[in-house]
Image (cartoon, rainbow, N blue to C red):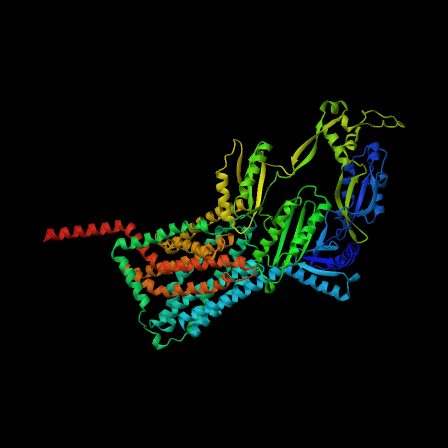
Amino acid sequence: MHYDLYGADNEELAYVAEEVIQPRLESLTEVREVDAATEDSEELVIELDQEQLQEDGIDPQHILELFREENQNRAIGELSEEDDEPRLRWDGTMLSVEDIEDMQISTPDGPEALEEYASIEIAQADTTTTAWKNGEEDYVFLQIGRSDDVTEVEMTEAVRAEVEDMKAEGLPGGVDLEEMLATADYINNDLRDIQTNVLYGGILALLVLFTFLRSIRATAIVGISIPLSLLLTFSMMWLMDYSINVMTLLALGLGIAMMVDASIVILESIYRKMQLGFPKFEAVIEGTKEVSTAVLASMLTTVVVFLPIGILSGDVGEFIMMLAMVIIITLVSSVIISFTVIPVLSDKWIRMKESNVHKKESRILRTYGRFVDWMSWKKWRRWLVSTGFAFLFFLSLFLVAFVPMSMMPDVLERQAELIVNLDSHTDDEDKEEIANAMHERLSDTPDVSDYTVITDEDMMFAFVNMTPEEEATLPQAQVNTEIMNNLEALEEDYPIQNVVMSMEAGEMGNPVEIIVQGDSLEGLHEIAEDMETGLENIDGVTGVHHSLSDMETEEQFVIDEEAVEDAGLTTGQVREQIEAAFMNEQIDEITLDGRDYPVFMNSDLEVASLDELENLAIEIPPEEEVLMPGDEPEEADTMDLEELVELETIEAPQELVHEDGQRIVKVMASLEDRDLGSVNADVQEMIAGYNFDDGYTAGFGGQMEQQQEMMMEMMYIFLISIFLVYVVMAIQFNHLIHPLVIMSVIPMTIVGVILGLLITQQELNPISAMGSLILVGIVLNNAILLVDRTKQLRKQGWDRANALQEAGKNRMRPIFMTTLTTVAGMLPLALATGSASNYQAPMATVIIFGLLFATLITLLLVPSVYMIMEDLLGWPKRYMIKRKHKKGTEISTEKG
């Protein structure tokens, strides 16, 4: 959570931030810390007297370690034989500058106070961080971190209440404290959007159900099962310590669309038995029994689909796993409710009118029966149907190249966060000029309301707030593009390497990242330049740069090994003395008078030029000698550093990374108006066409590499899921062929998914890929219903053709009911707006299109594959029967 403090000069703002706001907010149990980026922050500095340390032979590292060791409050044991076994505590916490000055240092002449070897003072921090608010430099940036045991929402509510109290009491000097960013708002908005979509989805599902059953009582039975299933789901989530967040609510939204499936199948079976004239109680028993195997098999196949998701790596895998677990919990809960509550309520509530009993078949059912009968007469007919659908599947695979792809969707709503990477050693004056230029550019960008720019060493961060959605004139994606174009235009006139969105520069790396590997730095630089040129010629690629583009001058030590050895030194001792001269590091933190200070230790030597470095005195330890009482130790000699080393000026990259023992260079870029998948294909083509010298190779990194790894992982997950589904169904049906018949609809599901993504231009990413996995479980449910009913009828003596016809007629209504209720439940998610829609819409779109397409195909494809499988695998049995019949005919002829 971030706040802006402005309305006075920096000195007064720093006082208000550190003395008023920081203590008030940090007193809240929900807040872990408040970090105030102020220009006049202070630090405690321990400046070592290098000459005195050398004179007494004291290593600066010894003082550093001693300070860390002494400034502690810790338990060191307990008295086990005393009452209550009291613990022993050593409190060495230093509470003042005087305590630090009095800290005892071991020397050859005995303990001495630290003040003999160093000066200790609280000084102004030499900060590298500066902030501007809408171009104004008098501004303080406050960053608030939450405690580990509270949620972001709880911390935000507590902080906002405290800030309102401070404003009511009046802030000193009339300064303004304004909230800039609260991630809890994203969470709350997403939760609200998903809750609304879940509610609408449930209502639409019930309307579809009523359209089919035309019975308020029957619809109410399924309607009651939804809150009961949710209650059971929440109970199980509580036992598993799952919280209500964006991912779990999204899973519940998907689950609600599917949780009525089991209830619908059981209710429809009971309803159909009543229509056939069964007594009510018998209809309930027989209807539930008839579909029990199919319902359990459907639930198990959907559950096992999610089991391999555990192999997904990274944060994406953790999110997807949470989503999968909640969906599994929802489905299991719905099946439990469907087998317990639905039969009881059906027996008590359903009233069947006389006119609904023994109704005639509809035209659709008669047409379907004639189609199945047409296929059953000739083998070529069923082969024609199956081959046609197989051709459609292979044809759809060529469309994958036109489907947009990405890693993870954007989650920000009417806000943008950018990183401006600067050339190395950009001075404060240049940074201020860049900040002013950014101010001019951002202030002219449409729909930008306010912005903050913060510097940090060789980077600048920009946080941009856009006008609210109801006042917006441009969509967020277009505003992001305008911001990027405006800031990238500054690269020509200012020392800026590149500009990237922070989402692109996060843990997943740059959208486009080519890793070139080889031995020679010159060769790597040449290839990197060629790759940079190639990327600049690819549409949609912006901000191209490579890790060798910013070389810097270095002075490299060339050691005179002979001179070092003659001086009685080692190269390590020389290096340590040079490092001590440049020592300036934070060694600890300390609280003095209720205020926290970082503790820095540095040297009093001023080495800022080559002359001062060359004249740096290097101590030569004296030869070991036995001292008699009263003898003074011999003073150590010194010699100038230039007598031991030479300096060589070289050009070196800011960062040089090695991988597998070889140097690598990264060529990086961002995307604009194109998806990662299509750019990936162009980059692959560019690399394939490049003529690499021996010893040099190139591969992908960043989001491109992760996308490829994710696709491979999802492929493995998909294959493992299909295998597990087959095993479960083979055990459930006690048959090896029927599962293959059922799984024949999976390719048709993929056709629907590809068409859905292509038509809507939704991106293929881990979220939509997860939707495809969910879809496999759903579409198999319909095929299971059909094959299970066919198996039951065959056991009752029906021939194959009539059994397939009757099974299709019996199961057509529940198949369409479950499909359309699921689609209705998903529809609000697919049409959702706001930041949450970036997660909801791809998954819902995949499920809707894949399910609709596969359902229409299931009733046609499954019967044809069923017949083909029996034709192929049943020929030995038919041959034996035919042979036996022929033999019997010959015997009869002989007897005649």
Q: Position of residue 503 (x, y in %)?
A: 59, 51
Q: Position of residue 452 (x, y in %)?
A: 68, 55
Closer to us: 704 or 886: 704
| Viewport quadrant of the N terminus | bottom right
Say above or below: 627 vs 868: above
Left or right of 762 in this view: 79:
right
Q: Position of residue 872 (x, y in %)?
A: 29, 50
In which quadrant of the rendered view does residue 803 lie?
bottom left
Closer to us: 663 or 221: 663
Asked whether residue 371 is in view, the answer is yes
Closer to us: 210 or 410: 410
Q: Position of residue 548 (x, y in %)?
A: 61, 38
Say above or below: 637 vs 544: above
Farthest-out residue, right: 630
Closer to us: 894 or 364: 364
In which quadrant of the rendered view does residue 656 lie?
top right
Asked whether residue 348 is in view, the answer is no
Left or right of 839 in this view: 270:
left
* Residue in view at x 53 percent, y 31 percent: 695
Please give the count of numbered marks on the rendered protein. Answer: 0
Farthest-out residue, left: 896
| Viewport quadrant of the C terminus | bottom left
Left or right of 484 in this view: 15:
right
